[in-house]
Image: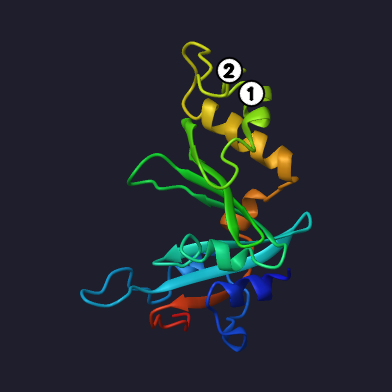
């Protein structure tokens, strides 16, 4: 699907895209993450890379809630939530309107979805899990983030994902409101 269709499936009005903006510019928008008794604002920036469309979510976005709707009609979705305030980071893979598998990074042995073991061979090959698919592979002391990078690398390889670092920061992408009433005018 196109980045614009991804934005639409996430709740955006296709006619309301901003001019392409960077991560730092989106942080200048008036986005209220929490409003007592009401939904917060959700904004996304969308683009495409290596045959996949992607969305970077800001504020109270909708990607996790709408993953099965986004994944309808044979569409594949890989949804990564960093969860900086509440570990672990979470990863879900959905296709044809269903979450097929998901897990927390660092907790790959606890999986969910219609086919929870779908990525086990990839995680075993990457040295994340032992061959039984349950035991976390022990490698002794490692630098911070090494195990997480192995998991993300296995997922990237399995699905042919390639998101340039620039997309997260400096790359200018179309932005859309997907929830709430953010003021999308740059200041």
Kindly indicate the quadrant of the structure image that contains residue 173.
bottom right
* Residue 22 in picture, x, y percent from top left: 57, 66
Identify the residue at horizontal 53%, vertical 46% (top origin): 113
Classify mark 2: helix, strand or loop.
loop
Could you say which is closer to the camera, residue 124 or residue 174?
Answer: 124
| Relative height, residue 135 to residue 155 (above, below) | above
Gap in angstroms between the C-alphas marked 1 and 2: 6 Å
Of mark 1 and mark 2, the one earlier in the sequence is 1
Could you say which is closer to the camera, residue 183 or residue 132?
Answer: 132
Identify the residue at horizontal 43%, vertical 71% (top origin): 42
Could you say which is closer to the camera, residue 169 or residue 116?
Answer: 116
| Relative height, residue 183 to residue 72 (above, below) | below
Which quadrant: the N terminus? bottom right
* Residue 175 in picture, x, y percent from top left: 56, 74
Evaluate if marks 1 and 2 touch, with contact meaning CB atoms under 8 Å apart. yes
Identify the residue at horizontal 53%, vertical 69% (top origin): 44
């Amino acid at each position: 699907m196109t980045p614009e269709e991804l934005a639409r499936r996430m709740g955006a009005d296709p006619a309301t895209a901003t001019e392409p903006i960077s991560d730092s510019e989106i942080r200048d928008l008036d986005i209220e993450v929490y409003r007592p008794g009401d939904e917060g604002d959700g904004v996304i920036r969308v683009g495409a890379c290596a045959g996949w469309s992607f969305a970077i979510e800001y504020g109270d976005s909708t990607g996790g809630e709408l993953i099965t709707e986004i994944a309808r009609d044979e569409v594949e979705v890989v949804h990564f939530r960093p969860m900086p305030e509440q570990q672990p980071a979470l990863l879900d893979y959905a296709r044809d309107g269903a979450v097929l598998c998901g897990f927390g990074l660092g907790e790959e042995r606890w999986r969910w979805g219609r086919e929870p073991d779908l990525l086990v061979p990839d995680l075993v090959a990457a040295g994340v899990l032992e061959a039984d698919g349950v035991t976390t592979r022990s490698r002794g002391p490692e630098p911070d983030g090494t195990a997480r990078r192995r998991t993300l690398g296995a997922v990237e390889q399995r699905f042919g994902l390639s998101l340039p670092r620039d997309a997260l920061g400096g790359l200018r992408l179309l932005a859309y409101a997907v929830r709430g009433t953010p003021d999308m005018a740059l200041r």
